[in-house]
Amino acid sequence: MISIDSNFDSGNIVVEHIASPHEIVLSIRKDAHSDFYQWYHFRLSGARGQPCTIRIINLNGSGYPGGWPGYRACVSEDRQVWRRAETSYDPKADNGTLTIRVAPAVDQLWLAYFAPYSLERHHDLIARIAARPGVAVDVLGHSLDGRAIDRLVIGEGPRTIWLYARQHPGESMAEWWMEGALERLTDPADPVARKLRQLATFHVVPNMNPDGSIRGHLRTNAAGVNLNREWANPSAERSPEVMCVLGTMSQTGCDIAMDVHGDEAIPQVFIAGFDGIPSITETQLALLDKYKARLARLSPDFQTAKGYPRARPGTANLAMSTNQLAERFGCLAMTLEMPFKDNDDLPCAEFGWSPERSKHLGRDCLAAILETLPDLG
């Protein structure tokens, strides 16, 4: 008997009806107290050896309907290796329908918007990295549901660098990026890491939104709040996750900040800066341009031609972390975006954009930071 379930860490799906292997109709539950929906993660059971057609409907009203054309679903037989499945999108069918075709070779197949990064894996990551020499770990505060906002502190240098991810919990590639960056940064034999630890102190928050992560949200915390619109005035009632991180940043200062994300629609890797902040300087802009040029040289997965439109002077939204930190500290602040689809500049038919590519990018971003540190003056 075919069944669908999602009552697990980051699970999210609604079963509309199952008539046969060729007629499995689903929809996506909204983030709690919010109209955002796009993230899905569920398990298909009882379909071994049967060609299945899965339709996810009502997607024209999703958070980013432009994310569906050209997108391919992630599937896994073992929850370790995630491949891409045959997928198509029809905006005219049932208010927008994503059709996924699979023929499982096993009794249970896992499907997700992107390869999940579970809260259990997060705890394993924190414990593993914290056990390495020269690493300190603490809890900056707690989420609305009482989960820890973990920080790792690495290095002993005078420059202060903040790396933080998963303000938007459905952007799980951001924590895969963190895993790659942390593994390199704590490698005792890696010369880039050794030099970085000598020159800078890193403050790393791998998951800023554990509540949204475990609930299967796309974009918000337990209160339905988009954390990346809370940096101008975070509160204990709405956004304690931002309040505790920003409060600690105010104590440490900040020379470089990188906010790690995923983008639903744009099939490239890119960086968004802080155009339009009131106190923007030519020095800040030059640092950003140099960093992007270095990363483009170091990683063929990164490019500078495509991305978000630049804000006009004086129009930056200071409730967003990159703008707020660039304005507050006069620092080099960046929002790194990775695709949910594939990187069209360097496509991979089997895996698309993947956890492994996210991890490699994290390592390359560190190398670009090392090259940039001398420019800070």
Image (cartoon, helix red, strand yellow):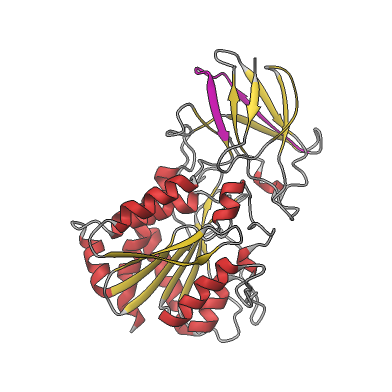
Residue 81 is one of the magenta-drawn residues: no
**Residue 361 position within the rendered picture, expressed as x and y whole percent measured from the top left:** 39, 53
Q: Indicate left or right for 42 with 76 as reference.
A: right
Residue 302 lies in quadrant: bottom left
Q: Indicate left or right for 7 with 181 as reference.
A: right
Vertical side of 35 occupied by 87: above or below = above
**Residue 266 position within the rendered picture, expressed as x and y whole percent measured from the top left:** 59, 51
* Of the pair 95 and 27, the residue shown nearer to us: 27
Vertical side of 138 occupied by 283: above or below = below
Most common SS among magenta residues: strand
Vertical side of 319 occupied by 118: above or below = above
* Of the pair 264 and 172, the residue shown nearer to us: 172
**Residue 335 position within the rendered picture, expressed as x and y whole percent measured from the top left:** 52, 65
**Residue 226 position within the rendered picture, expressed as x and y whole percent measured from the top left:** 65, 62
Give the magenta part as a residue range: 96-111
Locate the N terminus by quadrant.
top right
